[in-house]
Image: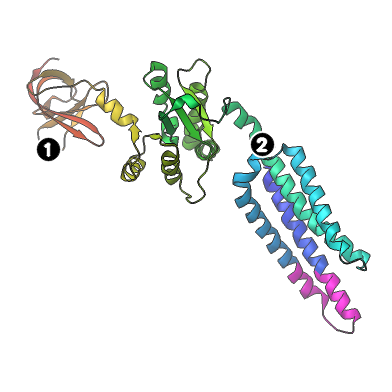
Amino acid sequence: MPEKIVRVVFTIACGVMGGLWARYFIEQLNEAGNQIPMMPWIGVGAAVGILTGVVVLVAVHLISQEMYERLAPAVVAVVIALLVGYAVSRYMLFWFPHTEPTLQIFISVTIVLIFGYIGIYVALNRAARWESLMSAVKRTSAVPASAGGSIKLVDTSVLIDGRIADICASGFVEGVLMVPRFVLKELQHIADSADVLRRAKGRRGLDILKKIQDPESKVSVVICEDDPDNVREVDAKLVELAKRFKAKILTLDFNLNKVAQIDGVEVLNINELANALKPAVLPDEVMEVKIIKEGKESNQGVGYLDDGTMIVVDGGRVHMGKTVQAVVTSVLQTSAGKMIFTRFIGVIQ
């Protein structure tokens, strides 16, 4: 909210300054003998001032994403910006010693206004995000030398899913989990969403990150500040970083999985791990399943194991709501998971 207020005030101030500049020049021209109407040109000057302010806003937004997060604290940023703006204005006026006092004031105020906004923008962003970033990032962002080639880049989907915390606690994940800064930003953006469901997912992701960063955690978590400039999408940035650090990508995203494999980057997919850990079944094995819905084909019933594996029972449609015995005929592994096809034997209850 403070950022929006400052943006609006800055834009209005730019419009006012633009109008004052236009009025000044029109007065100078009219004193020279011209008859130029004042009001239309003041409006044009105000519009130009507003446009200039918008350009400055966009430029600061694009530049600051990568630069100001590594600068001095908020107060220092404001002071430096104001001093630089004043120094630049005085330097410009040094070359024009005979400039009228009014014009000198206009030049100084305009330059200090622009630099002052840049400093305030930097300060507000650092003040608003410093505490949350420092609480989320409790360890150094440098990759430990002992990590070797066991670095794993963590995608946003993995943090939102949450199972990574239990996997880490089990000790099956070794090496270093690296969370890029742009992934953390995306997670914060989701946590600040107006949509209730997205906001809950984002906050869950931040909670999971803090959980695996706990000092008692069995993995080392670092925040990577590198942000490839030649790509914009998060998935492409992850692939680029994986190549740079010779790391693996930990994700649940199907598309990222395929793109990374095409680029020769190894991917660890938690869904594939979960499918691999499901109990193995063999043809002619007898199992019990409760029929809960109809299948796609006639006379088929569908049930599920505790781990979510779908069981298709041929001849089970008429036994909806009952637990039946069935013999396994085949097992189909799909990208969505494992499906077990069975044949009805008899009703248990």
Percent position of residue 230, x then y? 49, 51
Q: Which residue is mark 1?
A: 297
Residue at (47%, 24%) from the top-left corner?
146
Q: Quadrant of residue 104?
A: bottom right
Q: Secondary structure at mark 2?
A: helix
What amino acid type should be assigned to the residue bearing mark 2? Answer: Ala
The quarter of the rendered structure image containing the C terminus is top left
Percent position of residue 111, x then y? 79, 57
Residue at (83%, 53%) from the top-left corner?
87
124 w.r.t. 108: above or below: above
168 w.r.t. 255: above or below: above
Residue at (91%, 79%) from the top-left corner?
31
Q: Dot 2 surroundings within 10 Å: few (below 14), some, or many (20 or more)?
A: few
Query: With 98 as the anchor, is 301 left or right in this view?
Result: left
Q: Earlier in the sequence, mark 1 or mark 2?
A: 2
Q: Which residue is mark 2?
A: 128
Q: Dot 1 surroundings within 10 Å: few (below 14), some, or many (20 or more)?
A: few
**Colouring scheme applied when the structure was drawn:** rainbow
Q: Magenta region: which residues?
A: 22-45
Closer to the camera in the image, 223 or 9 = 223
What amino acid type should be assigned to the residue bearing mark 1? Answer: Glu
Percent position of residue 279, x then y? 21, 20
> Looking at the image, is mark 1 or mark 2 nearer the viewer?
2
Alpha carbon distance from label 1 to label 2: 57 Å
Percent position of residue 66, x then y? 59, 45
